[in-house]
Image: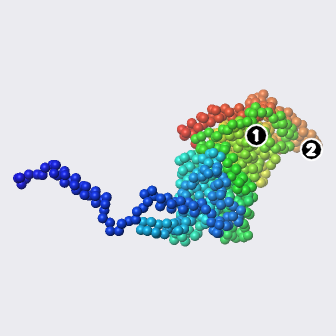
Amino acid sequence: MAKDEKPSPTAATRDQATNRLNQLASQISPKQKNPKPNLPADHSDVLNQIKDLRIIAATPDPKNRGYIRQKQAGKLWVRERIEALLDSNTFTEIGSVSGTVTWAKTAPRCEKPVSFIPSNNVQGAGLLRGRKVLLTADDFSIRSGHADGASTGKTVYVEKLAIALRLPVVKLVDGSSGGGSVTTIKKEGWSYLPHVASFPFVVQQLNMGIPNLGAVVGPAIGLGAARVVSCHFSVMAADIGALFNAGPKVVEGATFEEGLDFQNLGGPMVHCMNGTIDNLAANEAECYEQLRIVLSYLPNSGREAPPVISCTDPEHREDIALRSIIPRRQARMYDARSVITSVVDQDSWFEIGALWGRTAIGGLARLGGRPVGIISLNCEVNGGALDAAGSQKLTRLLKLCDVMNLPILQFLDVPGYAIGTVAERTATMRWGVELAKAYFSTTVPVFNVVTRRVFGVAGGVMLGCRDPVMQVAWPSGQWGSLPLDGGIEVGHRHELREAEKVGKKEERYQELEEEYLRLMNPVRTANAFGVEEIIDPKDTRKVCCSWAEHVYEVLIRERLADRASGKISPTFA
């Protein structure tokens, strides 16, 4: 063979193949000086570790001082709460083995957990009367709910998950919900700048109309307090609930207020009376029932219509008693709630904020099975004149209805904004204007039933918040710029002074009052088309149900399309 003669292609290919096989063989059967132990092919070792950790997390330790303290306070343990709230056997936990684990090495590649402190915030998903919800529940028995290694990450994840899946969120707050503690500094070895990582996502949920419902079932402290107060609806258990920015010991050091306990610092008589928390419940069980009821009126998000249910209460039902419920004497009072319960579906009225802002009445109900928001004035408190707290309550309800696509039915008997020194000192006009802004910036349909008085700026705002206005009036209606009481004195001051000089002031005042009352006959207003229609009060339910039917068949569908296209963007926060 010549020197420059090359090997045949077949021989070269054969050599290359042999080299590759040798390389593969060395990888498949490497020479090992110290063979590693065989691990189970089915990964049962890892699965058993997960199983053991889940058992520890789900089993209370009767000797744990946190658990003992929880029971001595009359509170349910966190997993007992989940069982009490959700439909049976529907809870699926997220982050079930998150927490602090101490591991013991059992082999070069093997270990086992020897101790486990679960995360003190249990999160997951389950069914609430058949509706899928996301749930977060504090475990006060572990570090009083203060932040541990997993709670912040889990909380942020679930808040994001609610946005992605368009699912309601229920928050059972007992502690600080992952808030800070000075012991964290010692544990980590450095002090940190505080951040509230979950709140941007909470605000997004609130404005998207993803229901956020919270219950105070223990002391809600700092971040825990903020989380529940930020919800669309909140309720506090009277026997165990409290809420504060900082506990009694911290307050004592900062403000020198001594002898405070949870109740007089931030119990239900504080926060269910000032509007921080919406509703009061007798105990945990009643808290959970209120959460179920409220959710039944709300959609999963603002991209959906509120859930309509079947109704056995006839939509054409009449109530003759409504003809005489408004006293002929204008100064006399009546029970405004009885008007509401007569008109809406039987047993569907759910009041929100009954203990605060009591000049106003607000809540949720149904008309022919269709959820609606309800607004009324309470003539039994301050004559029904809207004060600062009443305006705040109605502002919050208007925004709730707007993001949840709930049409609003109003029963109007409003003499105007509250007057006097107390009204001025509590900034009634400031909050009255905020209410006006809410009326004119929300877009959900509103229907008015004028039961009696509509006076002043407050009356004008509530009555004329939509164009065209949709309303009816009762024959008891009376309206104008000012009520006659005081209005006659102002408008006829000089005339009455002259009459007083000859001893005929009372006589002239009575003449003027009678004349004005004759001219204020609601039929005269209807003659001028100042009011569209005066109805027989007994027919109010029929009229309101007819309106609600049309709203749900036509207007709500258009509204959902407008929200999807970005034409309207309701906001709660």
Q: Residues within 10 Å of mark 1 (few under 14, many from 20)?
A: some
How many labels were placed on the picture?
2
As helix, strand or loop, the secondary structure at mark 2 comes to helix
Q: Which residue is mark 2?
A: 501
Picture quadrant of residue 349:
top right
Using the rendered image of the protein, determine whether residue 266 is visible from the camera's viewpoint. no
Picture quadrant of residue 240:
bottom right
> Which label sits in the foreground, 2 or 1?
1
Image location of residue 266, percent across then percent down: 71, 61
Position of 207 with respect to 313 (left or right) is left
Q: Which residue is mark 1?
A: 346
Image location of residue 63, percent across then percent down: 64, 69
Image location of residue 5, percent across then percent down: 8, 51
Please report contact status of discs 2 and 1: CB closer than 8 Å, yes or no: no
Q: Residue furthest left?
A: 2
Residue at 65 percent across and 46 percent down: it is 129
Residue at 54 percent across and 46 percent down: it is 165
Using the rendered image of the protein, determine whether residue 221 is visible from the camera's viewpoint. yes
Residue at 68 percent across and 52 percent down: it is 288
Residues at marks 2 and 1, CA–CA distance in whole angstroms: 58 Å
| Kind of residue indicated by mark 1 | Gln
As helix, strand or loop, the secondary structure at mark 1 comes to loop
